[in-house]
Image (cartoon, rainbow, N blue to C red):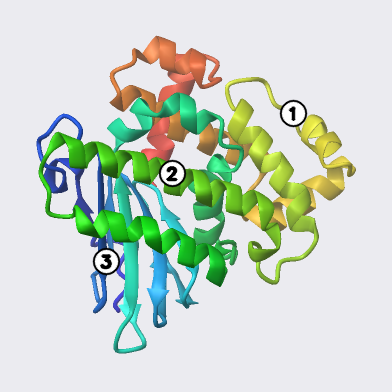
Amino acid sequence: MELDSNARWLKTSEEIFPHRPHAMTLAFQTEQYRYRMHEHDFYEINIILEGSGYHYIESRQLKVNVGDMFVIPPGVLHGYENIDPVFNVFHLVANKSFFTKYAEEIKLLGQFKVLFEIEPYLRANERNFYINLDYDFLTELKSDITILESIKSDVTDESDTIRNIITLKIISSLCRYAKQNSDHINKNEPKEYQDIMRALEYIHNNYSEKITIPDLAKLCNVSKATFLRKFKSVTKTSPNKYLLFCRAKNARRLLDGGLSRTATAQLCGFFDISHMDRVLSSYDNT
């Protein structure tokens, strides 16, 4: 597959979701996969059910096998390609309305931000951090996939609601699995990775507050110099730049949702509107 980050094929919620009030999720499987690189404005969960192939994210290529699971956030360039003749990838798609509707429930899932925000960032930046689901869990998950397959063509409010509930169940199960099976994540990564994960989770949970490097170093039980070295090794950036990345990402989400610039700047930890505008402009132009 040709990787051309300048040719970004965008798929939008408006294009793929039917215009029904409860149509917030979609599920399907692809067995012959050679899609050009693309991005979209919704979240997607991909699980390899059969065969092996390549997963592309931004400029990276990863060989993937049965049980590997990936989250694709909005705006991330990605694609897949077969190695085996049959390369069955399960796709579970959820738009912004889904995450708004179930915001309170999702907030209670301890590993949600790890899987949906931190993991994709690290995977796109040269870290092989992703889940491999074991046989028993994958078998359990297939029962939900079977239900989704059975109502794939249904266009009723009832079927839309069932899809939404099963999607929430799958997300909850994946978060629970990630918490209980941390050894299935972080393949071949050094021990320092777990230290920095605590700092990353803290940043994602508290990006609206004042966060200092000494505070993060203390959280990781290391000196400031050691923390900075480890953080750069894991994330390929500095703590301050990563914090700005989180603030910009959440600011863009709030602004797209119609929140005022003043309220967005306050909620996302910017000094003022001008500061927010400068940061957003720098990320929008990259």
Task: Provide the secondary structure element on which disc 2 rests.
Answer: helix
- Residue 169 is labelled as 2
Q: Is residue 125 above or below residue 155?
A: below
Q: What residue type is labelled 1?
A: Thr
The residue shown at (44%, 59%) is 141
Q: What residue type is labelled 2?
A: Lys
Report, in whole angstroms, how far the alpha carbon at label 2 lies from the one at label 1.
Answer: 36 Å
In depth, the one of 145 and 202 nearer the eye is 145
Estimate the x, y position of residue 45 in percent, counting from the top left.
39, 55
Residue where numbered disc 1 is placed: 212
> If you read the primary sequence from the N terminus, does the residue marked by circle 2 or circle 3 appear first?
3
Task: Provide the secondary structure element on which disc 1 rests.
Answer: loop
Q: In this view, does 179 lie to the left or right of 10?
A: right
Report, in whole angstroms, how far the alpha carbon at label 1 lies from the one at label 3.
Answer: 44 Å
* Residue 58 visible here: no
Q: Is residue 120 above or below residue 134?
A: above
Q: Residues within 10 Å of mark 2 (few under 14, many from 20)?
A: some
In depth, the one of 33 and 4 nearer the eye is 33
The residue shown at (40%, 24%) is 277
Residue where numbered disc 3 is placed: 29
Front tag of 2 and 3: 2
Q: Which amino acid does label 3 sit on?
A: Gln
Specify the quadrant of the image occupied by residue 249.
Answer: top left
Q: In this view, does 239 lie to the left or right of 132?
A: right
Q: In this view, does 54 lie to the left or right of 209?
A: left
> If you read the primary sequence from the N terminus, does the residue marked by circle 1 or circle 3 appear first?
3
Front tag of 2 and 1: 2
